[in-house]
């Protein structure tokens, strides 16, 4: 199965879980997105790879006209229903892949992606599309799990992510993001990072990870190099802490 079909299938099956997931539904970054929408003064915004729509809700609550865009039809159904429940009439949905956007050049003042890019088949193509649909001087905000710069910890992260979820592609390092963004025509990103605690059982349950794969994840975490375990603060029950980042950049002329 091709990557995009695999991702759509995996996330379509667990759409409702992502609406109620605490690490997705909460976070100071959501309040920050709402504040950014207010700062920009009712911008046209694209939530790229919207998932269950938490970034889109925050942007709409901040006054933006929002297009929530995702590969999964099931996710978009969840977003439509939740937006209606919240009375967010400025939020709309459309289905498609991040690497090919069905929007005209310069359609948006702001593009946001939150905890999605590590599932994209080819991030450089998606970033070029994000630049194309942004107005000159428009902003892109990437919020995602970040891989450590140290290879031993990076390898551990990618291994457990892929075992947990076969649609995982890569959590990128900040240095990788900087290179990809500038190659796509964006300025060097302003970056803030924070810890993202993961309850082991909830993290596996959210993707309905099989017991065989869950056992492999436990084994990999338990036997990982000490410096990698220390980086992720691995606990006795397998719970750990990821690094998340906010990268804000601007379309260059």
Image (tube, rainbow, N blue to C red):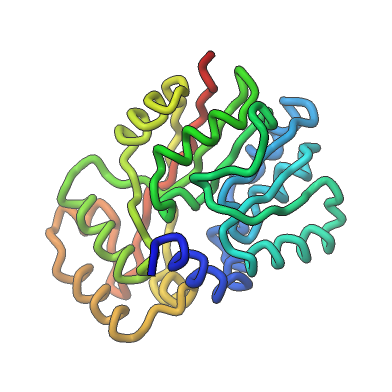
- The residue positioned farthest toward the bottom in the image shown: 211
On the image, which quarter does residue 34 sit in? top right
Seen at 43% across and 68% down, the residue is: 6
- The answer to whether residue 112 is left or right of residue 107 is left
Q: Is residue 138 above or below residue 217?
A: above
**Residue 121, percent from left and from top:** 40, 52
Seen at 69% across and 53% down, the residue is: 94
The total of numbered circles placed on residues is 0
Q: Is residue 115 above or below residue 1?
A: above
Seen at 46% across and 25% down, the residue is: 190
- The answer to whether residue 214 is left or right of residue 14 is left
Q: Is residue 81 above or below residue 109?
A: below
- The residue positioned farthest toward the top in the image shown: 253
**Residue 14, percent from left and from top:** 55, 74
Residues 113 and 184: in front is 184
Residues 127 and 39: in front is 127
- The answer to whether residue 83 is left or right of residue 248 is right
Quarter placement of the N terminus = bottom left
On the image, which quarter does residue 52 sit in? bottom right
Seen at 23% across and 50% down, the residue is: 154
């Amino acid at each position: 199965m091709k990557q995009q079909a695999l991702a759509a299938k995996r996330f379509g099956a667990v759409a409702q879980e992502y609406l109620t997931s605490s690490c997705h539904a909460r976070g100071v970054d959501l309040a920050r997105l709402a504040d950014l929408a207010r700062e920009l003064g009712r911008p046209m915004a694209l939530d790229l790879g919207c998932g269950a729509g938490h970034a889109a809700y925050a942007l709409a609550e901040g006054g933006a006209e929002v297009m929530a865009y995702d590969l999964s039809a099931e996710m978009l159904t969840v977003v439509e229903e939740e937006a209606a429940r919240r009375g967010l009439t400025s939020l709309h949905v459309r289905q498609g892949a991040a690497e090919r956007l069905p929007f005209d050049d310069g359609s948006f003042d702001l593009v946001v992606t939150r905890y999605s890019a590590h599932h994209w088949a080819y991030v450089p193509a998606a970033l070029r599309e994000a630049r194309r649909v942004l107005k000159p001087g428009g902003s892109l905000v990437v919020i995602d799990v970040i891989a450590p710069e140290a290879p031993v910890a990076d390898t551990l992260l990618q291994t457990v992510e892929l075992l947990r979820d076969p649609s995982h592609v890569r959590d990128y390092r900040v240095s990788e993001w900087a290179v990809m963004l500038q190659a796509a025509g964006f300025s060097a990103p302003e970056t803030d990072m924070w810890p993202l605690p993961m309850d082991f059982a909830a993290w596996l349950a959210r993707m309905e990870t099989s017991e065989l794969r869950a056992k492999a994840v436990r084994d990999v975490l338990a036997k990982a190099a000490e410096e990698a375990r220390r980086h992720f603060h691995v606990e006795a029950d397998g719970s750990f802490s990821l690094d998340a980042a906010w990268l804000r950049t601007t379309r260059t002329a």
